Image (cartoon, rainbow, N blue to C red):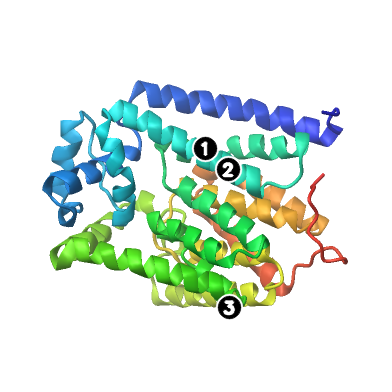
Amino acid sequence: MRRPPLPTAVALVGTGVAAVYLIAYGLQQAIASLSNNDFRAYFAAALVGLRQGWDRIYDFPLQKAAAASIDTSWQPFANPPPLAWLVAPFTLLPFWAAYLAWEVLVVAALLLAWRLAAPGGGWTKLAHLTTALSLIPVVLALWLGQACVLVAAAIAVAWWLLRRGRDVEAGLVLTVILFKPQDAFLVPAALLVAGRLRAFAAWALAAGLVATIAALTLGSHGLQEMLRDLAALEGVALNHRYAVSGTLGQASWVLGLQALLGLGALYAAWRRRASGEMVICAGLLGSFLLTPHLSLQDFTVLVVGAWLMLRTAPPRWFRFFLLAAYALAVFAIPLGGVPLLMVEVAWLAALAAGLQHYQDGRPQQDDP
């Protein structure tokens, strides 16, 4: 491999040092306390489903009892039932072994997303990985075992399939969004308005089937418990600190603004319909701007969106914009949700206003 250009070398060293530090910190925290992760909520819900029935997975007392049985603290399970189904086989292992196995899956998902979506090759591609791993949202998602990493990988795989004309397979892969819908629920609609009808139809049929099975397993009582628990969890500020409603409040004008932003995302997807990368980015941004439930680790999904955008060889000013967004994400915890919200709106505005490829219209594979 040839020696990297100076800017790439500087990026590798700077982000590499930060990545090593954050990963070491995450490993230290994971080893110090196996109960300090989100996987314990998935695991406890799966235990409840296997022991008491899948219609009881949103029963808080049963979740607490399941958490106590594996010697972990309780964290509410707030994801759709398919995630508990996915984790069910992991319950055959002791909790610590199941967590390690799950972490292997999550890390592999991130590497898959990077391998498929990140532009360039050699040192440039490696720099994209170290840059991602130098972001607190990404390392936090890995350490917690967050399902958002699986959604990020599904977005990358779906884009890869769409690029090869395999729309039906791409739509089926997008059913992974059901594990954590708030991160990408508008992507199928963006594909629809962009004219990718087969992809949307495949997603709608598969997701509809899974949702129907989930509703049948929950029953009316289970559905009521799920809605009640979700409403209760929305009262926790940390769950929506980075959402529009968590930043601006829940006044009627905020809801109107969100509706306009959602329509703007669909308009951007329609206008940029010739670019699968931009269509997916519009869907991701619309999802983030509409959802009432958004945590810091969810921004891992937008890293995949940034990689896809860089593949379209955007103007230089947009690359500097993404660099500024990276800096704001680094300091997201002390700065709060306002700067990241501004990034999302500005990014969406750039897409809707007609952000262009280079003149030949062909995506550039490298991003020096």
Residue 311 rendering spot, x and y as whole percentages: 74, 54
Q: Amino acid at mark 1?
A: Ala
> Crowding near pointer 2: few (<14 within 10 Å), some, many (20+)?
some
Residue, disc 3: 193
- What's the residue at 57%, 53% (across, down)? 157
Residue, disc 1: 108
> Crowding near pointer 3: few (<14 within 10 Å), some, many (20+)?
some
Give the position of the N terminus as an image quadrant.
top right
Query: Residue 47 or 231: which is nearer the viewer?
Result: 47
Residue, disc 2: 112
- What's the residue at 39%, 54% (across, down)? 179
* Gap in angstroms between the C-alphas marked 3 and 1: 32 Å
Residue 346 in sight from this viewpoint: no
- Which callout, 3 or 1, points at the residue further toward the start of the chain? 1
222, above or below 53, in the image: below
Residue 225 rendering spot, x and y as whole percentages: 18, 60
3 vs 1, front mark? 1
- Mark 3 residue element: helix
Query: Residue 217 or 264: which is nearer the viewer?
Result: 217
106, above or below 57, in the image: above
3 vs 2, front mark? 2
Instruction: Tell me if label 3 and label 1 are in contact, CB under 8 Å.
Output: no
The numbered mark at residue 171 is none
335, above or below 347, in the image: above
Residue 220 rendering spot, x and y as whole percentages: 15, 68
* Gap in angstroms between the C-alphas marked 3 and 2: 28 Å
Instruction: Tell me if label 2 and label 1 are in contact, CB under 8 Å.
Output: yes
Relative to 188, 305 lies left or right = right
Give the position of the C terminus as an image quadrant.
top right
Q: Amino acid at mark 2?
A: Leu
- What's the residue at 63%, 55% (across, down)? 160
- Which callout, 3 or 2, points at the residue further toward the start of the chain? 2
